């Protein structure tokens, strides 16, 4: 994409319309997913900590934080993704009247196998991490992943790629492959490290290994977002938790 094409598209109504559509589609999905965190929120309080207010108040405050994050990252992603070539495929399809079924099939063909591979790796690499996951309600793991992908991929990864593109390429052309790969690597480090408090609170004896497992398992999700769209990353995330739950249930 050359500079003139970038400017013309950015100032035209198609980009603005697509950004609005992307924002509302992603924000609604993230907001619905947040509601499925309610059963898991009480587990965020360490056993030896006594709240100065009721648990219901704590849950409400936590939900407010999640909703604010969903709004901010949904908006940032909707504004910046068209400028770096990332997308939410279903939002784009609704604008261009493309067949949803064909798009979802492609998303599943990429996302589900990567989710399965990650589940196999995590199950055999880090049993402590699998034990930790089993303490989180399954519905939270399956649906809550939508919110995590909106924050980490749609929001954070997009910001990192856009910032690096502006700094290292001065905002010209499209972000280079190596730049994007580097940004995916960096954002995935942040994603893994973000799990540290929960792992420590759970009492995992070797959290570093669990963090490494998280890093390896979820690293392809950034690539999926880049190449296939946000939905493919969501499918990989959800498939990962579904297959882990299956492996635990059948005692693989």
Image (cartoon, rainbow, N blue to C red):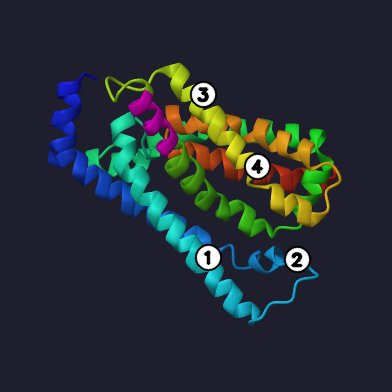
Disc 4 to disc 2, C-alpha distance: 19 Å
Q: Residue at x 68, y 38 (%)?
A: 214
Q: Residue at x 36, y 26 (%)?
A: 167
In the rendered view, would you say 175 is above or below 27?
above
Closer to viewer: mark 2 or mark 1: 2
Secondary-structure class at tag 4: helix
**What residue is shown with label 2?**
46
Give the number of the disc on residue 182: 3
Sequence-earlier tag: 4 or 2:
2
Question: For residue 162: magenta?
Answer: yes
Q: Which residue is identified by label 4?
A: 193
Q: Which residues lie in the magenta part?
A: 158-167
Please state if 101 lies on the left or on the right of 127 as rendered: left
Q: Sequence-wise, which precedes: disc 1 or disc 4?
A: 1
At 64% from the left edge and 66% from the top edge, which residue is drawn? 41
Answer whether residue 14 is magenta in the image: no
Secondary structure beneath disc 1?
A: helix
Q: Hey, which residue is sitting farthest front in the picture?
A: 167
Q: Earlier in the sequence, mark 3 or mark 4?
A: 3
Instruction: Write down the residue under mark 1.
Output: 35
Residue 132 pos. (x, y %)? 77, 51
User: Could you tell me which residue is drawn at 43 percent across and 44 percent down?
Assistant: 155
In the picture shown, does residue 52 fall above or below 155? Answer: below
Real-space CA distance between mark 1 and mark 4, rounded to the nearest whole angstrom:
24 Å
The numbered mark, 3 or 2, whose residue comes first in the sequence reads 2
């Amino acid at each position: 994409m050359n500079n003139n094409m970038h400017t013309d598209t950015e100032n035209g109504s198609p980009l603005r319309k697509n950004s609005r559509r992307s924002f509302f589609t992603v924000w609604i999905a993230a907001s619905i997913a947040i509601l499925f965190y309610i059963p898991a929120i009480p587990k965020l309080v360490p056993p030896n900590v006594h709240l100065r207010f009721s648990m219901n108040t704590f849950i409400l405050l936590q939900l407010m934080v999640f909703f604010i994050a969903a709004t901010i990252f949904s908006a940032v992603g909707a504004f910046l993704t068209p400028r770096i070539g990332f997308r939410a495929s279903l939002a784009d399809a609704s604008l261009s009247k493309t067949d949803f079924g064909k798009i979802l099939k492609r998303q599943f063909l990429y996302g589900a196998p990567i989710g399965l591979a990650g589940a196999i790796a995590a199950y055999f690499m880090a049993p402590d991490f699998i034990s930790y996951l089993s303490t989180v309600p399954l519905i939270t793991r399956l649906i809550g992943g939508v919110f995590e992908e909106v924050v980490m991929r749609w929001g954070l990864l997009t910001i990192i790629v856009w910032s690096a593109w502006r700094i290292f390429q001065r905002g010209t052309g499209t972000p280079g492959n190596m730049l994007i790969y580097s940004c995916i690597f960096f954002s995935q480090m942040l994603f893994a490290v973000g799990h540290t408090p929960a792992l420590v609170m759970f009492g995992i004896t070797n959290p570093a290994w669990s963090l490494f497992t998280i890093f390896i398992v979820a690293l392809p999700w950034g690539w999926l977002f880049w190449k296939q769209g946000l939905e493919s990353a969501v499918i990989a995330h959800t498939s990962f938790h579904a297959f882990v739950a299956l492996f635990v249930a059948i005692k693989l």
